[in-house]
C-alpha cells in the first residue's frame, strides 16, 4: 500500500485528493498546505510518492517545486508528482533532470478522469514518469532550434514527446499508428542524434533525454 503526501493549498481540492487516493487503496500520511510543511513532511515522512502543487503559501510562487528540489537533494530519488495549473519551466527542468526516482508533472485542467490520475500516481510511485504532453511541449519548445534537437524529424519529435510522457514503445505504437519496429527505429535514431546510449528502461531513457535538454 503506497504512502502518499498531498501538498495543496485549496482545501476542497486537497480534501478531494485525499478521499480519492484513499478510495483507491493509498495511505495518505499527510495533507499539507504550505511550502515549509511540505519540506518537513518530505524529509521526515519520506512518502512513497508526493502530490505537489507548484504554488503554495507563504508567497504562492514556486514553493512546491522548491521544497521538492530541496528534499530530493537530501533524499535522492524521492518520487514527486507535480499537479499544477502552471508550467514553471526552469524548476521543472531541474526537477526532471536529476536522473533519479519517479517524476511526474500533470496540469490540473487536463486530468480528465480518476483512472488517468491514479495511473499516474502509481507510475511515479513505482519509479516511472507521468508527464502531460503540454508540459513536455513547452520544455522542448525552447530547444527546438538548437542542435542536435533541431535535427529531429517531425515524427521523431512526436516519438520523443511520447517517450517523455513515460510511454513504452508499445503505447507509442498505438498512439501514433506505427508498428513497434518503426517506433524502435525512431527511438534508436533519436538516441543517436542526441548522443545518448539506448536503454530499455523507460524511466532512465526519459530522464536522460530531459537531462540532456536541460543542459543545452
Image (cartoon, rainbow, N blue to C red):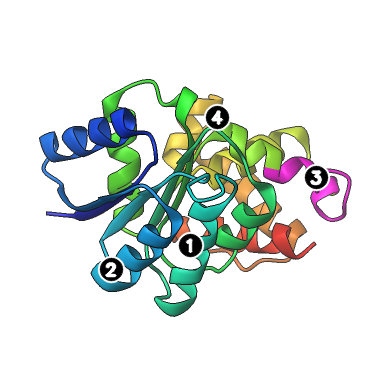
- Residue 10: where, in percent of width, then height? 38, 34
- Relative placement, left or right, of 143 versus 124 is right
Q: Which residues are magenta?
A: 139-150
Q: Is residue 126 above or below residue 134?
A: below
Q: Earlier in the sequence, mark 1 or mark 3?
A: 1
**Callouts 1 and 3 close, C-beta under 8 Å:** no
Q: Position of residue 178 (x, y in %)?
A: 55, 29
Q: Nearer the viewer, mark 3 or mark 4?
A: 3
Viewer-side label of 1, 3: 1
Do the residues bearing badges 2 and 1 touch, measured as CB atoms within 8 Å? no
Residue situated furthest front in the rendering = 58
Q: Which residue is mark 1?
A: 67
Between discs 3 and 4, the one toward the N terminus: 3
Q: Nearer the viewer, residue 165 or 45?
A: 45
The correct choice, above or below, for 8 with respect to 112 in the image is below
Q: Secondary structure at mark 4?
A: loop
Local crowd size for mark 3, using a 10 Å CA cut-off: few (<14), some (14–19), many (≥20): few
Q: Residue at x 45, y 56 (%)?
A: 35
Q: CA distance from mark 2 to mark 4?
A: 41 Å
Instruction: Quadrant for the C terminus, please.
Output: bottom right
Residue of label 2 = 46
Question: In the image, is residue 122 part of the stretch drawn in magenta?
Answer: no
Q: Residue at 41% across / 52% down in the picture?
A: 34
Q: Which residue is the site of mark 3?
A: 142
Relative to residue 154, is residue 44 depicted above or below?
below
Amino acid at each position: 500500500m503506497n504512502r502518499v503526501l498531498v501538498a495543496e493549498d485549496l482545501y476542497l481540492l486537497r480534501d478531494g485528493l485525499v478521499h480519492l487516493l484513499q478510495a483507491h487503496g493509498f495511505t495518505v500520511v499527510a495533507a499539507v498546505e504550505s511550502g515549509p510543511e511540505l519540506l518537513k513532511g518530505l524529509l521526515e515522512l519520506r512518502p512513497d510518492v508526493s502530490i505537489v502543487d507548484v504554488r503554495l503559501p507563504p508567497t504562492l510562487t514556486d514553493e512546491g517545486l522548491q521544497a521538492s528540489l530541496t528534499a530530493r537533494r537530501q533524499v535522492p530519488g524521492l518520487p514527486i508528482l507535480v499537479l499544477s495549473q502552471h508550467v514553471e519551466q526552469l524548476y521543472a527542468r531541474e526537477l526532471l533532470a536529476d536522473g533519479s526516482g519517479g517524476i511526474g508533472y500533470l496540469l490540473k485542467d487536463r486530468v480528465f478522469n480518476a483512472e488517468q490520475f491514479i495511473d499516474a500516481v502509481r507510475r511515479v510511485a513505482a519509479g516511472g514518469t507521468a508527464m502531460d504532453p503540454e508540459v513536455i511541449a513547452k520544455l522542448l519548445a525552447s530547444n527546438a532550434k538548437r542542435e542536435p534537437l533541431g535535427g529531429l524529424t517531425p515524427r521523431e519529435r512526436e516519438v520523443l514527446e511520447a517517450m517523455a510522457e513515460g510511454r513504452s514503445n508499445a503505447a507509442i505504437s498505438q498512439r501514433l499508428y506505427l508498428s513497434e519496429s518503426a517506433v524502435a527505429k525512431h527511438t534508436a535514431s533519436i538516441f543517436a542524434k542526441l548522443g545518448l546510449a539506448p536503454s530499455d528502461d523507460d524511466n532512465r531513457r526519459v530522464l536522460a533525454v530531459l537531462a540532456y535538454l536541460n543542459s543545452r
